[in-house]
Image (spheres, rainbow, N blue to C red):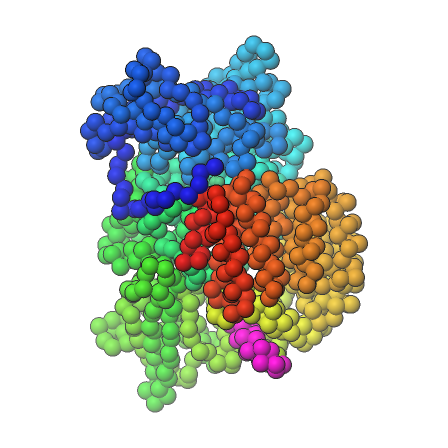
Amino acid sequence: MRTDVARPVRLADYRPPDYLIETVDLTIRLEAGNTQVSSRLALRPNPAGRVGAPLILDGDGLSGRLAAIDGEAPPAGSVSMSPDALEIAHPPQRPFTLDIETIVDPAANTQLMGLYRSGSAYCTQCEAEGFRRITYFLDRPDVLSVYTTRIEASRTEAPVLLGNGNLVETGDLPDGRHFAVWHDPHPKPCYLFAMVGGVLDALKDGFVTMSGRKVDLAIYVEPGKSGHALYAMDSLKRSMRWDEEEFGREYDLDVFNIVAVSDFNMGAMENKGLNVFNDKYILASPDTATDSDYAGIETVVAHEYFHNWTGNRITCRDWFQLCLKEGLTVFRDHEFSADQRSRPVQRIGAVRNLRAAQFPEDGGPLAHNVRPELYHEINNFYTPTVYEKGAEVIRVLKEFIGDDAFRRGMDLYFERYDGTAAIVENFISCFADASGRDMTQFMRWYSQAGTPVVKVRETYDAAARTYALQFEQSCPPTPGQIEKLPQVIPISLGLIAQDGTEIALETPAADQAGGASAEEVARGMFDLTAKTRTLVFKNVAAKPVPSLFRGFSAPVRLDFDSSEEALRLSLAYDSDNFNRWQAAQTYATRLMQASVTALRNGGRPADPAGFCAAMTRVGEQWRDDPAFASLALTLPGESDLAREIASDVDPSAIHDARRALRSALGQAQAAALTKIHDELSTATPFVPDAAGAARRALRLTALDLITAADPDEGGMRALKQYRSADNMTEMFGALSVLVLYAPSLRDEALEHFYKKFETDHLVVDKWFSLQAMIPEAGALDHIRALMQHPAFSMSNPNRMRSLIGTFAMANPTQFNAADGSGYEFMATNVLDIDKRNAQVAARLLVAFRSWKGLEPVRRAKANAALQRIAAANALSADVRDIVTRSLA
Ligand code: 0A1
Ligand code: ZN
């Protein structure tokens, strides 16, 4: 294991490599405890590098030897070798070859980086720095090489042998062994290398590209499961078509293979022509996967496929540029999902996720720029900020310059930088050129951490019939960044009249006070670039209700004191569905915040009557848009509320406040909710499309609220639904209600569910995670008991995340138990897991990211748990980095 790297890596220190590697010829002889890797590298000095510099190849825990330089044994003393580096002090200053032999042990690789075993397969994971665990190499993304990979293995142990690129040769070897040779003609960095060998079944299909080329598609899965890959295959073909139609991007190899494995640190990996997936994002059938699992598969398959252009054809110069591929690719997968499903529903989901995962990061000790400038451990920068905020920044860019200039800029980017390792400035320069706009200020989105706040004040002048909106932006300090400068914030807005109609926007001309450009007015999109801006709207007959940041046009917090009446009007009439939903959320948040304060002072929850009345219309009109009704009727979560409260947070008061409002809403809407639950029960065959998912989501929302109001009635309905369900969405939804809110029915239901699905590991993960969420005092004891369950494993990332991760991230009252037991439990487990899998341990530790906002008693306990981790010996670089930054 690599332990703490004392020296941080800084963007400012970037230097081009001194040597380049043109071709890589690998022979990998697979054997569980003893895999031999022979690598022939064709190198040459880099004209942009230092002349005569030593050549230092990266390694990580390797053992092996340098067999030859230019085919000859290296002169004695010319080479030094350690597990972490191979150094040649005076390499030839002309093209030369190196032959390197290493031996690795895939069976003992518990970090799941480099070459490892998962189930019946050997597989690899090289991003970010895993290739150096296979062989010595210039393991940095700006060294692009053409790879040829020969894989040898026992035919029974690994009948399937896969590599990057196209298959060029296969054949038999003595002793029951065989081989396959793969060649990838596209130069790539080593983090995109992959190989797989194993006993796998395949689902095969084909795709004809826009220029008429035929591509063989295959998804490899554990034996017997190929029927569960149909939806992933369908998603892949739709992604390939969409990228052609929307971005003009065509696939560039004869084959595209996906392999699903059950041991994987992250979601999936975009290795060239050979994506490797956590099987959770591939395997689905109606009776084992929920609608949200299906949506996850569609998104992740698309994401990895889209990387072929944004990530692989154009890669990153260095890891500081990670958002160049990740933010852009998330933006592309969001757009894809919006086109495949419902745009507002997708947008609401993405914003919920941003607020739940990225806002807390940006508001706590782990805050960092979308493009960081320093890291100790790059694995810890695969964050919601780089991914989700990175995607929002692309959306801001598109709004700022408009759709046409955005598309022209993308075309320019592909044209100029194809085949290169680029930086964010390269990317942005294409949009500057395409739009003619100065992007200097826009770049602050990459260099300033923290969530900007936009404060808005309104003034209506009845006599002048004018309505003014005054905007003021600010950004809170974040670690190492106290002063912030104004950013480019596009504000999409509309005005709603008291009768619910949309008011046509009219402003003075751009050069007058309160004015705006004709283009801004036409688009309803106004740029806030200075610290403040005032917009004046003319011919406004009566005070309107503003609809601000429609579609969440910028990743900011809005600070605007709208009246309850305005929120009701917006909820009922806003032409922007996102803001209709937002109105319900804002309304509920305010009420619950008032309740939290009251409850902590020994009082009673705030009066919910106005809110409940406003929601009546939503409940009654569910047929118009079941997806919207379901989203609007779902109250903000406990962590949403904690984030809004931000300091002196008391998770148990938050839980009680939310429970009170859920139950009041359930009571007020009882009639409509039971109607919804009854009417939507008519069994329709399960189709995992947006319309079906919306109906099922609404039915579950109704069941949840019915249960909140009347646990007996809810429990009865849930039991009936559980028994009659013909798909996992309805079954697991019902089970969730039974487990979380009907203690007397819980055990029997859990036992039944486990028996029914014990052979399906993805369903068993759900079973563990549901129990980790029980918001009751005994939760932790129950979790400890579950860790002794035969199906639990401390080596499978999904299993650890389903039980331990869910507890920390989705059981706020118990993780934050006032006695500190939840924190201590996490500390113990993080330390234990860190010995085997540093990445998983570090990610679990991120659960403490908001500890500084807790009320004093919990805060002290969380601090103690973090200090205990920090004091431990032999921490991985991953955990050391997170714990140090968390405590700073
Ligand atoms: N590039 C992948 C994410 C990824 C990163 C690191 C990994 O190592 C364990 C695995 C996957 C993506 O964005 O999908
Ligand atoms: Zn990605």
Q: Which residue is at the front of the view, 168 or 871?
A: 871
Q: Which residue is at the front of the view, 33 or 333?
A: 33
Q: Which residue is at the front of the view, 202 or 337?
A: 202
Name the residue furthest top. 174
Question: Does residue 537 appear in the picture of this structure?
Answer: no
Name the residue furthest bottom. 463
The quadrant in which the C terminus is found is: bottom left
Instruction: From the top left corner, tell me how far across and down residue 268 is, in percent.
Output: 51, 41
Instruction: From the top left corner, tell me how far across and down residue 538 is, in percent.
Output: 33, 79
Q: Which residue appears at 57% of the width and 29% of the height?
A: 107
Q: Which residue appears at 68% of the width and 58% of the height?
A: 779
Q: For residue 475, what is the image quadrant? A: bottom left
Residue range highlighted in magenta: 581-604
- Horizontal relation, residue 560 to residue 615: left or right: left
Q: Is residue 239 above or below residue 155?
A: below
Q: For residue 675, what is the image quadrant? A: bottom right
Question: Does residue 117 appear in the picture of this structure?
Answer: yes
In magenta segment, residue 327: no
Q: Which residue appears at 39% of the width and 31% of the height?
A: 84
Q: Is residue 108 above or below residue 595?
A: above
In magenta segment, residue 599: yes
Q: Is residue 437 above or below residue 126?
A: below
Instruction: From the top left corner, tell me how far across and down residue 34 is, in percent.
Output: 53, 22
Instruction: From the top left corner, tell me how far across and down residue 160 is, in percent.
Output: 57, 24
Q: Which residue is at the front of the view, 484 or 714?
A: 484
- Numbered marks: total: 0
Q: Main secondary structure of the magenta part?
A: helix
Q: Which residue appears at 66% of the width and 57% of the height?
A: 780
